[in-house]
């Protein structure tokens, strides 16, 4: 983990409201693994005291990139970042997805910008599996080519049916899981809370392992402020807060205590 | 820039504020702890305490509002998990303590008396985010005086009550603290504040109310520190919205013997080092032989 | 969006705050005064009053600090110079009044009783910028109650004490005002604050201390308004840092029956109109038949 | 007076730290006279609640321009304004220089950006006079060509002697005034307080009329907030505050009560 003043290489719209920001950030890129994130200080956002966390999308050859969606005033201000600008990032932060026991038939489930760390993951493992990408409309479906070029099977769902199957990503996942009887696909998921919880609940019920990357509002990003906590059941059965930034952002579904 | 604050010897008068720097290890990769004047750790009560439900933090214009609710590992948890780490550094450790009632405050204080490597105790009587204890003590003069007096009897460590900002005459509280045996006072804690999501019509923070910190509160803090410093002869530690050396110098000129950087640690962890360096440069440029000379040097 | 605040009938619950809109004519080229819920004019005491020396205003992060010190033309000067202008509009005029002692407060109030075209009186007991009167009344419960009671006896106009924000339990002040006969309360006034020029080591404002306003204080104001509204059954007028319709709606949802736009008039004089329009759009979008339905509708 | 969303035409460095910002602002330009100012909202200066006042430098053919020096965070942020941007201005504000009794031998005294309204003035009157332009170094001497092309006599002073005479503008003015015995040149001055006061004191002592454009920190710019006040002696001899934004910014030297 370090603070790096990264220089912007490219910054382009990649579809819908999503942009890819590519940085020259060799120090951060060097140590990054899929599932980790950077805490980015939005340039020229006067009066803002908090950084914004983004999953690492790519980290190779001294370059690090993120894929982000404009959702509020910070990401809006990010749109003005231009090649050559300096962007201050802290990273890599958090823990990566556990990949040791990925098994033969992994399944990735992505919602919206949740594809970013999962695309990174797919590129770092030898096995080829299946990835479910869901979104509200076709404008929220990203990185399909990334997975296809790696030889992964891509299943797309959109809520409005504008691309792939119409419906929720979990419906498509259910259908697929029903065909995988006898295997125990390891799940890796990143996306909105509702999706993560649905994926996690199914996995827990079926006895599958599911690694979920949680999305919580963050302060420090390094474990100091206790803003980003999630209730997690410990090995002793006791439920307590864990810091998503430091102890996560990835937790196994069976230990997560979702809010009622 | 050495200073002696209430018997705590510091390399410089710049510390990190409680709750914004964890217990030390969290920022150790990014900030050289040996360079800090002192490290003030997150609030500790007797036993493990869970704090509030999330969301606990929200950014607002010029600052953030937090309602962590003093989550912490308790005295033993803290001493076991973090003191071995903290003892490695040549930097005083100040523990921010609180209790759900007077007895707990006293007991927590007493428990730290024979912990090795303690620099001092900051007595948090001003947290807006816990129903029990906290700000109720810090906004009632009699309760504050009584509590500080009781804790004083139970500890030989330097005792630094942390004052609430949301009182009309903070000088009275500073004076009451001095009279009750405090070795220094620190201020400001966060300003009680609230954000409502107009779409859901719910408070954004689960605790409804939280505490405002960051640049937005800086001029309020300078005013409170100035008043407190005029009221007492013990050292005053100033904080609230420091982002630059100039922000810190305002406190010193207003009468603070030391300062603490809080929210800005999140914005930019190098802030505290920049403040230390910037302060040293200022002292030299203006021909001050020590930071002490600048303390309270306001020309009115 | 018609509302009735303490008997003052307004087209909508959005007013302009005292001291930020002059006496009316200044902004008349830029803002259609007929569209305002009410206009609250700059503070008036008995005779012409010079206020403080310059500098009187300084921008800070997220707001500004002012120490105008209530410069004004006095009752007669105001009535002669500005009431003819103000009577042209179909918009209630609320006069913000103050005195250097209780007697002056009473007398000023009494003098407005038979001035034609008066909507109501806002009783400023919370100005941080005058040594005489002002905030001393607003932060002492007994003094505030006594003063409001005395003024109440001398005026039949709607009486709206303006409360100070820098107290730990503003609900007590709101209740005291209600009990003393106030028809409504307004809050917040500015937060006492200070800026020091570190090069000269002097306070930037000649008055040393001033009052912080603008977005920086908004979440503090929302919290204070929420507390005040819970404490009383008379209407509460909320203000502090409103820049958008959402900022205003937070106050209404927290319990304010009306709001006032202050500092944002300087930033962008169209703010108050945008707030009115934005509020109307919100009410429609969310299916509220009137602004009243939204008042205090916070889901806790 | 109105609020106008003006489009930036050009924005160029004109020397030293001074830039000219040219706006398409036909409504504001139409009514502007020399000595008036615009109150400008600095774009993208988040967390800033106050506009910044700038004298009108040129107002013609639907264009309005200002000449500004970078001195603090607002003017620094202004440097990033680009052609095509929208800038929100209120104007024209304040009262112009009284020109009715300008006489045959007017003298203008400008310090730094104070040349801006005086250049505008010179272009609006038929008479040709003398202009003194002072600054710390040659980098602070602007608009010389403006005056020369109008046939005015230009006298330059710099404190470091890098251009024109070395010294203060008032020294050069004194020398010139000594040569004008018998005439009563009307003075128009704009610049730092110290310069204005020195010019005013001389004029008052000599019985000349001197119109000084004062520079005070402003809030509203329209007379509502009472931030910008100056002590002025009224016709009845009584001294009271006048608002620089609304009652000024131009006052005749003999009525100004300078601070002790
Ligand atoms: C571990 C992690 C990884 C993430 N990875 C990505 C990514 O790869 N691409 C991407 O587009 N987004 C990602 N996000 C979400 C991203 O951080 C938010 O969209 C962003 O912070 C919104 O900022 P804003 O100022 O535009 O929104 P605003 O709503 O204006 O922000 C206000 C505050 O809320 C916080 N906030 C708002 N939404 C979120 C959110 N969903 N998660 C966390 N904090 C939030 C902001 O950080 C800020 O402090 C990630 C979040 C986390 C926690
Ligand atoms: C009537 C009038 C006409 C002016 N004309 C010009 C002009 O043509 N060209 C030019 O370069 N400048 C002019 N100025 C000065 C200009 O307004 C300031 O330089 C500018 O406001 C500085 O803003 P800042 O944010 O960069 O400085 P900061 O010091 O960061 O500003 C902080 C605050 O102080 C105020 N302030 C700082 N310096 C001044 C000042 N000298 N006068 C008034 N307010 C100040 C700012 O407006 C702001 O509110 C004029 C001022 C007035 C009153
Ligand atoms: C996230 C967060 C947690 C905090 N926790 C504590 C705490 O445990 N004890 C305490 O006394 N103050 C706590 N504070 C208050 C700070 O120590 C400091 O007084 C305040 O934030 C003002 O300084 P700043 O504006 O520089 O942040 C906390 C502040 C923040 C932002
Ligand atoms: C320049 C200025 C002058 C003010 N004058 C008065 C006043 O005369 N009387 C008063 O009660 N409040 C006065 N106020 C306070 C405002 O009415 C309002 O309560 C406060 O500014 C908070 O609102 P805001 O953040 O929207 O500005 C003044 C505020 C400003 C900024
Ligand atoms: S963001 Fe601070 S602890 Fe996780
Ligand atoms: S700037 Fe507001 S009165 Fe002049």
Image (spheres, coloured by chain):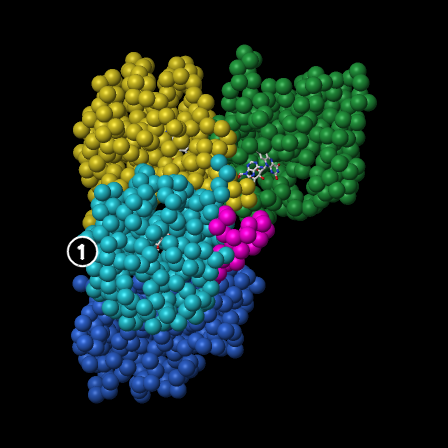
Chain colours: A blue, B cyan, C yellow, D green
* Apparent side of residue A91 relative to residue C180 in the rendered image (left or right): right
Q: Which residues are magenta?
A: B268-294
* Apparent side of residue B285 relative to residue A88 in the rendered image (left or right): right
Helix, strand or loop: magenta stretch: helix
- Label 1 marks a residue whose chain is B
Q: Residue at x 24, y 74 (%)?
A: A253
> Residue D95, percent across and down?
58, 25
**Residue B275 covered by magenta stretch:** yes
In this rendered view, identify the residue nearer to me: B290 or C109: B290
> Residue C33, percent across and down?
39, 27
* Apparent side of residue A56 relative to residue C117 in the rendered image (left or right): right
**Residue A240 covered by magenta stretch:** no
| Vertical relation: A206 (above or below) B107 | below
> Residue C94, percent across and down?
33, 24
| Vertical relation: B38 (above or below) D259 | below
Q: Residues within 10 Å of mark 1 (few under 14, many from 20)?
A: few
State the residue lying farthest toward the right.
D179
Q: Residue at x 65, y 37 (%)?
A: D113
Give the SS element for disc 1: helix
| Vertical relation: B225 (above or below) D173 | below
Residue D234 falls in image quadrant: top right
Q: Residue at x 32, y 38 (%)?
A: B169
| Quadrant the C terminus of chain A occupies | bottom left
Q: Residue at x 64, y 44 (%)?
A: D19
In this rendered view, identify the residue nearer to me: A102 or A91: A91
Residue annotated with mark 1 = B103
> Residue C285, percent across and down?
28, 45
């Amino acid at each position: 983990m370090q603070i790096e003043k990264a220089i912007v290489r490219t910054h382009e719209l990649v579809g819908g409201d999503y942009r890819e920001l590519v940085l020259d950030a060799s120090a951060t890129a060097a140590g990054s693994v899929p599932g980790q994130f950077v805490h980015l200080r939005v340039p020229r956002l006067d009066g803002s005291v908090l950084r914004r966390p983004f999953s690492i999308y790519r980290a190779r050859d001294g370059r690090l990139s993120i894929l982000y969606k404009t959702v509020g005033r910070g990401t809006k201000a990010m749109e003005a970042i231009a090649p050559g600008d300096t962007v201050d990032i802290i990273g890599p932060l958090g823990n990566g997805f556990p990949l040791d026991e990925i098994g033969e038939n992994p399944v990735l489930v992505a919602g919206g910008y949740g594809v970013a760390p999962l695309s990174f993951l797919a590129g770092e493992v030898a096995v080829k599996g299946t990835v479910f990408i869901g979104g509200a409309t076709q404008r929220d479906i990203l990185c399909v080519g990334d997975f296809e070029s790696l030889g992964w099977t891509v299943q797309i769902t959109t809520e409005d049916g504008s691309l792939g199957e119409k419906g929720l990503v979990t419906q498509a996942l259910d259908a697929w899981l029903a065909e995988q009887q006898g295997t125990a696909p390891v799940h890796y998921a990143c996306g909105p809370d509702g999706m993560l919880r649905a994926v996690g609940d199914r996995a827990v019920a079926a006895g599958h392992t599911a690694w979920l990357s949680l999305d919580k509002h963050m302060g420090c990003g390094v474990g100091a402020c206790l803003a980003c906590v999630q209730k997690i059941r410990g090995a002793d059965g006791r439920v307590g807060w864990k810091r998503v930034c430091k102890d996560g952002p990835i937790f196994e579904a069976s230990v997560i205590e979702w809010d009622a | 820039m050495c200073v002696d604050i209430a018997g705590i010897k510091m390399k410089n008068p710049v510390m990190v504020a409680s709750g914004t720097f964890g217990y030390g290890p969290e920022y150790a990769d990014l900030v050289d702890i040996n360079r800090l004047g002192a490290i003030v750790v997150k609030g500790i009560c007797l036993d493990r305490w869970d704090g509030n439900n999330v969301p606990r933090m929200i950014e607002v214009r010029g600052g953030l509002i937090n309602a962590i609710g003093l989550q912490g590992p308790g005295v033993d948890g803290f001493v076991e998990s973090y003191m071995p780490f903290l003892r490695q550094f040549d930097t005083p450790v100040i523990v921010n303590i609180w209790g759900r009632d007077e007895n707990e405050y006293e007991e927590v204080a007493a428990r730290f008396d024979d912990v090795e490597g303690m620099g001092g105790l900051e007595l948090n009587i001003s947290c807006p985010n816990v129903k029990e204890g906290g700000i109720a003590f810090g906004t009632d003069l009699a309760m504050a005086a009584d509590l500080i007096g009781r804790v004083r009897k139970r500890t030989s460590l330097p005792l630094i009550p942390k004052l609430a900002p949301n009182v009309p005459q903070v000088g009275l509280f500073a004076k009451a603290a001095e009279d009750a045996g405090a070795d220094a006072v620190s201020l400001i804690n966060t300003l009680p504040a609230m954000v409502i999501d107009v779409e859901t019509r719910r408070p954004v923070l689960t605790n409804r109310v939280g505490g405002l910190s960051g640049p937005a509160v800086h001029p309020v803090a300078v005013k409170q520190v100035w008043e407190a410093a005029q009221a007492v002869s013990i050292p005053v530690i100033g904080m609230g919205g420091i982002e630059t050396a100039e922000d810190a110098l305002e406190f010193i000129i207003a009468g603070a013997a030391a300062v603490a950087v809080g929210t800005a640690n999140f914005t930019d962890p190098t802030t505290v080092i920049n403040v230390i360096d910037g302060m040293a440069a200022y002292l030299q440029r203006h021909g001050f032989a020590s930071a002490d000379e600048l303390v309270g040097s306001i020309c009115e």
